[in-house]
């Protein structure tokens, strides 16, 4: 046997005969412990820098300092190979446990395996496939696949018999999302979404136990040696076949998500209405895919089926043209391409840029007012999507109680938008799984939860999907700009203005500029600015929040006078977000533990006017902060955020000093 390559891409999938470890190169326990120190383990993903850093490595084109973060090396260190084997062994144990009655397995678990376009993906997938096969799992390797696509495939399992080829028991997805290309990691899930914090916690504990075992290297070697070589060759040789299944599943699922209809005839009614609208008034989209996993997905086909004209840039896997995180300067290429396309064809109005796993796509739009292409802020994107989906429910005459679920850092603008449609907002701790699980709970209680997500990063999740998806975002925007009922004249924008009591502002030739102008005015910290991610000394976040409360209460008398003079603020309440929920914790800020903490400020009428927010990142070694203010300017946001940052840094110093004194 020899190296198996992808039949269309020519990229290496794996060599079944090349076992990644052998007796002569086993890393020591000390080596593994050292390599494990940088591991970040959370429900949002297990991540670290996996690219083996060497002087001869290639680096991402934007990295002049040649940081390991941006290494394009496909190789893993020996210690990282053991770490990956431990991750695979942990997940196989979990997935087999979900298919066990007593001590007997009902059948072989079927696991979907996929990667984004990071160079280390194939090496990690090779180890994963070997361990899963050695543990008695059936592996369907999709190779490069977008996160929403592998999850759409996995979502089919709930309605199919176990012997159907669309049925699966779980998925392992190899990605580090928006982190630089030298990073990589894992997301695990069952059905169409990732495991919750509660579900992933035992796996994290089991992995740590494995990594601390002096025999970890030898256990990993045994697992890798036990994988059947022919089964592995069959697994690698069928990547294109299983990718066709995922492509089909994703296309069907995306139609259901977009239309909010299960019955195919009803889906076609909505899809046909949009396609007709785009024929009458053409619509074009630029996709600057930045070499991401979306280069291998359904984007052009799906948008084309809606009657949308599509142009794709950097559409080859690993064609990284700029930073992976789709923010700020990473949107410049898309904006330039959109401006150019609009000059040739005025129908081109939107552009999107995904992150590496393709579960998020931030937008640029052509502003008729500014006569140029400009980025939409993440919070703006989420607000527009919520507006669109709530108006769509109104368009469909939804009579049941409606809820919107957001993360703790989402602007309170969403409460205003939801309130206009009679919907209620519920908040959860930052983290996709937390938002999804809260939405599931609310649906079980009788709520309609069509739209949910994390406004702080612009990522929306549209039911029945359980993951962010740029196609959902684009679908909402296209609906907002094109869906119109010819018999009633009702459009999503008109229904929004009617809900505000401002229908007189409506004109049939409205643009996205008009819709943006109608949004409630809030100024909010961008989560991806450097000043929103603090480097702090305190390892104990509970102690830091306890000190923050002391600092805040000490400063409150003078702060209150300043806030009243500037903004009419008279009072505050503190809210902790832990997992799928939020609760008041004004008496004890530290009750938020390692979760999110919001301090909401109220004006004299009792209306929410602003908030401070803080939380330790679950996927990066930073402490995130933000501020949000109604009817504020960027200068107001900056002043509030700077004040909040000052409090956090002072609390960090006090917490560090207290630890040293105790020590």
Image: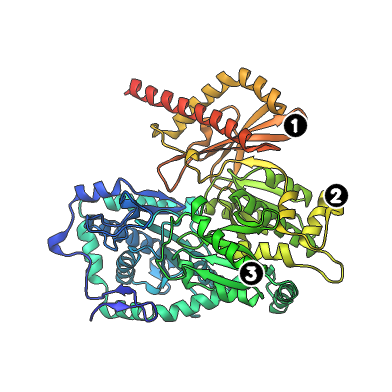
Q: Residue at x 20, y 51 (%)?
A: 214
Q: Residue at x 67, y 62 (%)?
A: 477
Q: Which mark is residue 284?
A: 3
The residues bearing labels 3 and 1 have C-alpha atoms spaced at a distance of 44 Å
State whether residue 447 appears in this view: no
Residue 169 location, x and y as percent? Answer: 46, 69
Image quarter in which the C terminus is found: top left
Mark 1: secondary structure: loop
Residue 262 position by quadrant:
bottom right
Mark 3 or 2: in front is 3
Q: Nearer the viewer, residue 509 or 551?
A: 509
- Please determine whether, in this image, residue 46 is positioned above or below residue 24: above
Closer to the N terminus: mark 3 or mark 1? 3
Residue 255 location, x and y as percent? Answer: 63, 72
Assess disc 3: are there few (<14), some (14-19) or many (≥20) residues with their C-alpha within 10 Å of its C-alpha. many
Assess disc 2: are there few (<14), some (14-19) or many (≥20) residues with their C-alpha within 10 Å of its C-alpha. few
Q: Which residue is mark 2?
A: 501
Q: Which residue is mark 1?
A: 606
Image quarter in which the N terminus is found: bottom left
- Please determine whether, in this image, residue 127 is positioned above or below residue 430: below
Residue 652 position by quadrant:
top left
Q: Which mark is residue 131?
A: none
On screen, residue 280 versus residue 593, left or right, reads right
Mark 1 or 2: in front is 2
Q: Are marks 3 and 1 in contact (CB under 8 Å)?
A: no
On screen, residue 82 versus residue 421, left or right, reads left
Residue 353 location, x and y as percent? Answer: 53, 60
State whether residue 335 appears in this view: yes
Mark 3: secondary structure: strand
């Amino acid at each position: 046997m020899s190296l198996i390559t992808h039949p269309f891409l020519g990229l290496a999938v794996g060599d079944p005969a090349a076992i990644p470890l052998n007796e002569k190169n086993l890393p020591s326990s000390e080596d593994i412990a050292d390599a494990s120190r940088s591991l970040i383990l959370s429900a949002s993903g297990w991540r670290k820098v996996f690219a083996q850093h060497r002087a001869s490595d290639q680096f991402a084109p934007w990295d002049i300092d040649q940081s390991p973060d941006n290494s394009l090396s496909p190789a893993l260190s020996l210690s990282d190979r053991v770490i990956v084997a431990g991750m695979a062994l942990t997940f196989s144990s979990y997935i087999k446990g979900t298919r066990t009655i007593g001590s007997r397995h009902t059948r072989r678990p079927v696991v979907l395996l996929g990667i984004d376009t990071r160079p280390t993906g194939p090496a990690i997938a090779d180890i994963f496939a070997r361990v899963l096969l050695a543990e008695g799992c059936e592996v369907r390797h999709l190779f490069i696949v977008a996160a929403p696509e592998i999850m759409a495939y996995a979502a089919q399992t709930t309605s199919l018999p176990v012997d159907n080829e669309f049925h699966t028991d779980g998925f392992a997805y190899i990605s580090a999302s928006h982190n630089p290309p030298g990073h990589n990691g894992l997301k695990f899930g069952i059905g169409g979404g990732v495991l919750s914090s509660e579900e992933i916690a035992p796996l994290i504990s089991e992995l740590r136990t494995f990594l601390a075992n002096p025999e970890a290297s030898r256990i990993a070697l045994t697992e890798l040696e036990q994988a059947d070589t022919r089964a592995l060759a069959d697994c690698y040789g069928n990547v294109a076949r299983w990718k066709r299944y995922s492509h089909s599943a994703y296309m069907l699922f995306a139609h259901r998500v977009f239309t909010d209809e299960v019955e195919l005839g009803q889906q076609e009614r909505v899809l046909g209405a949009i396609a007709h609208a785009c024929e009458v008034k053409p619509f074009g989209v630029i996709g600057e895919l930045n070499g991401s996993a979306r280069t291998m997905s359904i984007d052009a086909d799906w948008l084309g089926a809606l009657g949308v004209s599509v142009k794709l840039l950097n559409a080859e896997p690993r064609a990284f043209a700029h930073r992976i995180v789709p923010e700020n300067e990473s949107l410049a290429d898309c904006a330039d391409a959109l401006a150019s396309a609009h000059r040739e064809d005025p129908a081109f109005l939107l552009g999107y840029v995904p992150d590496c796993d393709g579960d998020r796509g931030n937008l640029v739009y052509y502003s008729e007012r500014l006569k140029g292409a400009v980025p939409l802020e993440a919070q703006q994107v989420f607000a527009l999507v919520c507006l669109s989906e709530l108006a769509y429910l109104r368009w469909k005459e939804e009579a049941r109680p409606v809820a919107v679920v957001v993360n703790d850092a989402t602007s309170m603008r969403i409460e205003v938008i939801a309130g206009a449609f009679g919907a209620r907002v519920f908040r959860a701790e930052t983290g996709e799984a937390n938002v999804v699980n809260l939405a599931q709970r609310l649906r079980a209680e009788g709520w309609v939860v069509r739209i949910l997500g994390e406004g702080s990063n612009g990522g929306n999740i549209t039911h029945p999907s359980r993951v962010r998806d740029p196609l959902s975002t684009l679908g909402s925007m296209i609906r907002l700009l094109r869906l119109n009922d010819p018999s009633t004249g009702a459009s999503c924008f008109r229904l929004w203005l009617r809900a505000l009591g401002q229908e007189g502002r409506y004109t049939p030739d409205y643009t996205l500029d008009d819709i943006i102008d109608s949004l409630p005015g809030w100024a909010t910290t961008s989560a991806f600015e450097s000043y929103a991610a603090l480097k702090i000394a305190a390892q104990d976040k509970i102690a830091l929040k306890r000190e923050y409360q002391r600092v805040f209460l000490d400063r409150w008398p003078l702060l209150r006078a300043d806030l009243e003079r500037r903004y009419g603020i008279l009072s505050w309440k503190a809210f902790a977000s832990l997992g799928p929920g939020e609760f008041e914790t004004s008496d004890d800020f530290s009750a938020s533990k390692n979760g999110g903490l919001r301090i909401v400020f109220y004006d004299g009428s009792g209306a929410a006017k602003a908030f401070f927010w803080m939380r330790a990142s679950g996927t990066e070694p930073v402490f995130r902060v933000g501020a949000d203010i109604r009817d504020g300017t960027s200068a107001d946001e900056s002043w509030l955020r700077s004040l909040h940052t000052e409090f956090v840094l002072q609390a960090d110093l006090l917490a560090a000093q207290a630890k040293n004194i105790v020590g």
